[in-house]
Image (cartoon, rainbow, N blue to C red):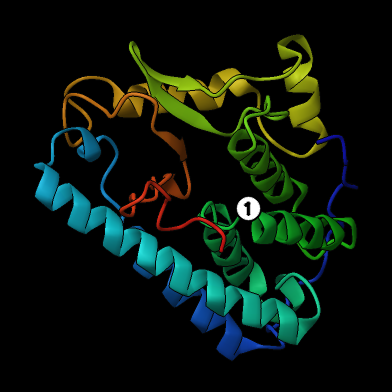
Amino acid sequence: MTTTTAQPVATASAAPSRPHLRETLMDCDDNARRARPPDGLIAVLPPHQLDAVLTHALELDEHNAGILRRIVTALGGWPGRAAVADDGCRAALGIALRCDHDPDFQRMLLAMLNQAAREGDASSAQWARLSDRVQVNAGQLQTYGTQFRYGPSGVEPCPIADPDGLDTRRASVGLPPHDEQFARLRRRHEPGRGPVPTPAPGAVFDPGAGVRIPAPRRPGGSPAGAAR
């Protein structure tokens, strides 16, 4: 992903033009956070409980994606600061980050968020997070180092393109140096601090959106969340 965005333009704080959409987005994002297993819990839940938790979380992600699809259709683009305020825009990002079950829609949202960031209606850092997520989901190297996974030795970033230029790229979209974010995550997930001692190896997560939910398998081998 080579698309770049302009730095966000400072705008005056104002009441959102679509407060009802703001509330809807925030409710959807909050419900998805509550439904998600805490970091690492996937590794220790009994299989029958894990299936139920993941199925519910994925169904909620799909439901929220449908709501976000209707919102972006109604607005003709990304629900940005002017329409839903900063917190509504952040909630929309959380929902978009969890649209892993529908990569085509997730890429469409990325293009909309890119345009919003260029116009100062969203932040470039938000665009960078979704851009990285799309790249990781496509099996590509991420550009800004915002997506992480649980490795054999604990939390580690998903593979990053051109690591030597990482902090320069992060600074260009308003993200702090990668080592700062990584150090905070390592402290948060070090033994004794997390909800469980052993995380699920390979599980991908965004620090703000939670762990990526693997789609359960249907009889015949196709993921329940696969595009149809």
Quadrant assignment, res 158: top right
Of the 4 image quadrants, the one containing the C terminus is: bottom right
Q: Residue at x 45, y 38 (%)?
A: 205
At 81% from the left and 57% from the top, the residue drawn is 111
Judge by depth and name the residue closer to the eye, 147 or 190: 147
Can you see residue 35? no
Q: Position of residue 106 (x, y in %)?
A: 65, 56
Residue corresponding to mark 1: 103
Drawn side of residue 99 relative to residue 184, left or right:
right
Relative image position of residue 112 (x, y in whole percent): 79, 63
Residue 21 percent location from the top left of the image: 59, 85
Name the kind of residue labelled 1 in the image: Pro
Query: Quadrant of the rendered structure where residue 168 is?
Result: top right
Q: Looking at the rendering, in which quadrant would you find the N terminus? A: top right
Left or right? Give the position of 181 relative to 50.
right
Q: Residue at x 26, y 49 (%)?
A: 37
Which quadrant would residue 59 be assigned to in this image? bottom left
* 150 displayed left or right of 9: left
Q: Mark 1 falls on what kind of element?
A: helix
Q: For this rendering, which residue is in front, 118 or 64?
A: 64
Q: Circle 1: is it few (<14), some (14-19), or many (20+) Cα within 10 Å? A: some
The reply to whether residue 155 is visible in this rendering is yes
Above or below residue 40? Residue 209 is below
Query: What is the total number of numbered labels drawn onto the structure image?
Result: 1
Residue situated in front as seen by the camera: 85 or 221 = 221
Above-or-below relation of 197 to 60: above
Q: Residue at x 39, y 45 (%)?
A: 214
Q: Position of residue 5 (x, y in %)?
A: 87, 46
